Image (tube, rainbow, N blue to C red):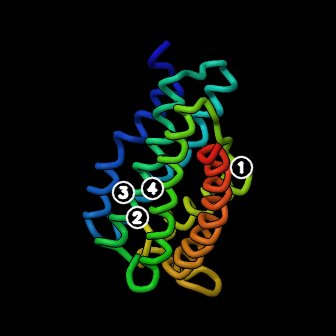
Amino acid sequence: MLWNVPNILTASRILIIPVLVGLYMVGEPEGNWMAFSLYVYACITDFFDGWLARRMDLQSALGKFMDPIADKLLIGTLIVMLMGFGPIEGIHVLAAGVILVRELLVSGLREFLAETKISVPVTLLAKWKTTIQMLALGFLIVGNAGPYLWVAETVTVGYVGLWLAALLTMITGYDYLRTGLKHMVD
């Protein structure tokens, strides 16, 4: 079945991206919190679309195609939005840039390797990277509208998470590239 529940969840993640950006543009504090709420929905669907597909035996070529695209579109759009209109500025643009470059590099690498019938599985470290990245972006979406958290402002927590995600991005990106290069030189 083409449009099963997991595929609908994935498609909804793509469709909400412009709405999320529009809500963010409403401004502080309402826009931040409304955008954050929609972002939480996107993060939840990112988990549940794959889990449901496996659990209900509904894995499909469409789902395998759409899921990584939905992830890249969401993350890429949010990073650009937060650089253009939000708190990602100055030296923090470097961490955001590292994440964007890795997303493009891994996408291209996966596409190349798929043509050679080689699959590169997602590693546990890459899953941790994604989790930290999602948390960091959530804190940055809330931005200055968020509360003071124990020892830091919400934005500061987001920056720390962004840099940690960038570090894990370099490690996992290198792992994927190393694996891919082995198949390119053969």
Q: Which mark is residue 77?
A: 3
Binning the other alpha carbons within 10 Å of mark 1 as few (below 14), some (14 to 19) or many (20 upward) gives: few
The image shows residue 62, relative to residue 170, as above or below, that is: above
Nearer the observer: mark 3 or 1; the answer is: 1
Mark 4 vs 1, N-terminal side: 4
Q: CA distance from mark 3 to mark 4?
A: 6 Å
Residue marked by disc 2: 79
Circle 1: residue type: Thr
Task: Give the spatial CA distance, label 3 vs label 1.
Answer: 24 Å
Q: Which comes before the other along the chain, label 3 or label 1?
A: 3
- Provide the residue designation for mark 1: 123
Residue 168 point in image, percent of width and height: 65, 66
Whether tag 3 and tag 1 are in contact, CB under 8 A, the answer is no
Measured in 3D between alpha carbons, the distance from the residue under mark 3 to the one under mark 2, in whole angstroms, is 6 Å
Tell me, yes or no, whether the two marked residues, 3 and 4, touch with CB atoms within 8 Å: yes
Up/down of 123 relative to 49, above or below: below
Cα distance in 3D space between marks 1 and 2: 23 Å
User: Is residue 34 visible to the viewer in this orientation of the structure?
Assistant: no
Around disc 4, counting alpha carbons within 10 Å, would you say few (fewer than 14), some (14 to 19), or many (20 or more)?
many
> What amino acid type is highlighted by mark number 4?
Ile
Q: Amino acid at mark 2?
A: Ile
Mark 4 or mark 1, which is nearer to you? 1
- The quadrant holding residue 132 is bottom right
Q: Nearer the viewer, residue 180 or 71?
A: 180
**Residue 19 vertical placement versus 23 (above, below):** above
1 relative to 82 in the view: left or right: right
Circle number at residue 75? 4
* Tag 1 secondary structure: loop
- Look at the picture and state if 111 lies above or below 166: above
User: What residue do we see at 43% from left, 74% from top?
Assistant: 143
Dividing the image into 4 quarters, which one contains the C terminus? top right
